[in-house]
Amino acid sequence: MSDMRQKSWLCRLLAVALLLCLSGCKAQQTPALTVDGVPVSGGVYQYYLHDALRHPAKYSIAEGDETAAGAQAETRCREIVALDRYLKENRITVRADLKRDAVAQVEGQWALFGAHYRERGVTKPDLTRILMFDAQKKQLVQTLYGTGGKHEVALKTLKKSFSKLYVGFKAFEGPLTKQNEQGETVELTQAEQKSLRESFRQMANRANSGTDLDALFAEYSETQGLVVVSPLSVSIMKDGDPMYDADFFGQVSALRPGETGVIASTGSLYLLQRVDITASDDDAFEAYRDEVLYREKMADVEQRVAKLGEARRRNRDCAGRIEGKCAP
């Protein structure tokens, strides 16, 4: 092949490659749908589509129903645009801490699942828009139901919900295992386990009769050849906490505030005293206050956002009417 023919062939090949590249880039830039003139990327649509197919119960659709999953993805896309417009029109700004949390979630999820997202056509900006949508809904909860909101939830109500959603306790543990002569971890013998249970039962009786739990902890630690250097701290957990056994929350909840009991968990016994976290530790309540508010009112906000999204589907301007029905 002559130099001239070779150059001509290379030029044609490069032209085809460039055309394919431009075609691919254009396809990637084409939005999945446009809501009131606002484009929503295919990556955002694909994220919700796959989420609906993976979790059909979450979206109230039949397993494997791609048509219904697609409809749900379109619904989420409309809601993203509708809520964003509503916040702008009502001059509602997302709190800085909510934005930081969303960015942190994006970074964490992208670091772990970036390849998985890319396979489905989801970009990092797509993921940012999706998680920022969640932050916007939290902001709307705060605006409507938080301190100073139009429908502010009373402090007493929040504390009551806090005491139902979370339990606080102080505890120390007695392992049901030991090290054998070979340095291996083995279970205590039946006799040793019986002795430990009886010891913990007696300590629970003493605690319920007025003996301080920290004093009991010091006594028990001394029998184990340990020295206590700080008092027991209050732990707070909610139902389903992966750090504890499935029935641990229920066992703690069964105790009255101030009551001490013996709770069995995987590999250990716990001498555990329930603490009234709403009365004794306001700092704990404040730390969880926002989460309690979201648990109580997020469903209501999501219904409101759904109405905004539905109004967009009907091409009716309802962005400023989240408090009521749209005008015909």
Image (spheres, grey):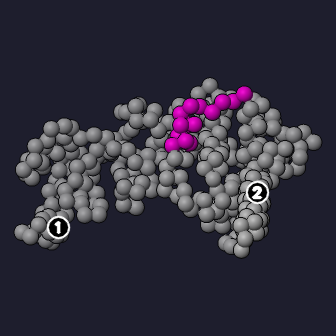
The residue that label 2 is drawn on is 22
Residue denoted by label 1: 185
Going from N to C along the chain, the mark reached first, 2 or 1, is 2
Q: Is residue 265 visible?
A: yes
Residue flagged by tag 1: what amino acid is it? Answer: Thr
Q: Secondary structure at mark 2?
A: helix
Q: Is residue 280 above or below residue 238?
A: above
Q: Is residue 318 above or below residue 250?
A: above
- At x 40% / y 48%, what residue is drawn? 237
* Position in image of residue 1 (x %, y %): 71, 74
Answer whether residue 254 is visible to the viewer in this image.
no
Q: Main secondary structure of the magenta part?
A: helix
Q: Quadrant of residue 321?
A: top right
Report the side of 83 relative to 127 (left or right). Answer: right
- Where does the image place residue 73, in percent across and percent down from the top left? 73, 58
Relative to 73, is 278 on the left or the right? Answer: left
Q: Residue furthest top?
A: 148
- 4 horizontally vs 95: left or right: right
Circle 1 — which element? strand
Q: CA distance from mark 2 to mark 1?
A: 63 Å
Does 6 sit above or below residue 287? below
Determine the residue positioned at 56% across, 62% down: 116
Up-down relation of residue 49 to residue 142 (above or below): below
Q: Nearer the viewer, residue 206 or 325?
A: 325
Quadrant of the image occupied by residue 209: top left
Estimate how packed mark 1 is, as few (under 14), some (14 to 19) or many (20 or more) residues with alpha carbons within 10 Å.
few
- Image coords of residue 303 (percent x, y): 72, 47
Residue 151 vs residue 309, the one in the foreground: 309
Residues rendered magenta in the picture: 91-104
Q: Relative to the observer, which residue lies in front, 102 or 299?
A: 102
The residue positioned 36% from the left and 46% from the top of the image is: 256
